[in-house]
Image (cartoon, rainbow, N blue to C red):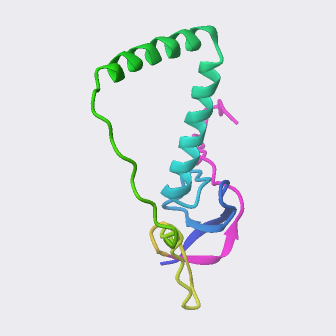
Amino acid sequence: MEYSARIFNCVRCHSQVIICSCCDRGNMYCGPTCSQKSRKESHSAADKRYQDTYRGRLNHANRQKCYRERKRKIVTDHSSKESTTNDLLPFVINEDLKIIYNDKLRCHFCGSICNYLLRTSVLGRAKIFIPGVWPLGP
C-alpha cells in the first residue's frame, strides 16, 4: 500500500527528507542525530542566558567555590598523555537517512512505500462535521 508522504528539508543539515503520513508528526529534523544536536545547542543557549542573569551568576559562583574546595583535597598529580601526531579522524555515516530507490519512494523513518505525489505541508487535524451543530473551531 502506498502512503501519502511529505517532503521537507531538515532544519539542521538541510538534507531532503521524505516522511509518510503514518510517521509524520510535524517533524523538522531528518532523524535523532540532528534533533539531539539541535536540542543540545538549544539547552546550551538557555544555560548561557541563565548565567547572564544576577541569580545565575550567584549560583555559578557558589558552584565554582564548592568545586575548588573539592579539588583542594586531591593530593595526587596525573601525568600528561602522549599525543600521536598521525591520527586520522573517524569517518561517520549519517545512519538516519536511509532511503531506498528501487523505482519507489520510501519513508526515511519506517521504509514504507510512498506515493510519488509529495506534499510540502503537514496534514491538519481531521475536521468532523456533525449535522445540526455549529463548528466551534477553524
Residue in view at x 29 percent, y 26 percent: 74
Q: In this view, does 110 lie to the left or right of 18?
A: left
In the rendered view, would you say 66 is above or below 111? above
Magenta segment range?
A: 113-138
| Count of number-bearing discs | 0
In the rendered view, would you say 20 is above or below 39? below
108 magenta-colored = no
In the picture, residue 41 is in which quadrant?
A: top right
Residue in view at x 65 percent, y 34 percent: 135
Where is residue 29 drawn, in percent x and y? Answer: 59, 56
Residue in view at x 62 percent, y 27 percent: 48
Residue in view at x 57 percent, y 61 percent: 30
Where is residue 85 drawn, in percent x and y? Answer: 52, 68
129 magenta-colored = yes
Magenta stretch, main secondary structure, is loop
- In what quadrant of the picture does the C terminus appear? top right
In the rendered view, would you say 20 is above or below 41? below
Q: In this view, does 138 lie to the left or right of 105?
A: right
Q: Nearer the viewer, residue 83 or 65?
A: 83
Looking at the image, the residue that sits furthest to the bottom is 103
Where is residue 20 drawn, in percent x and y? Answer: 54, 66
Q: Is residue 30 left or right of residue 137?
A: left
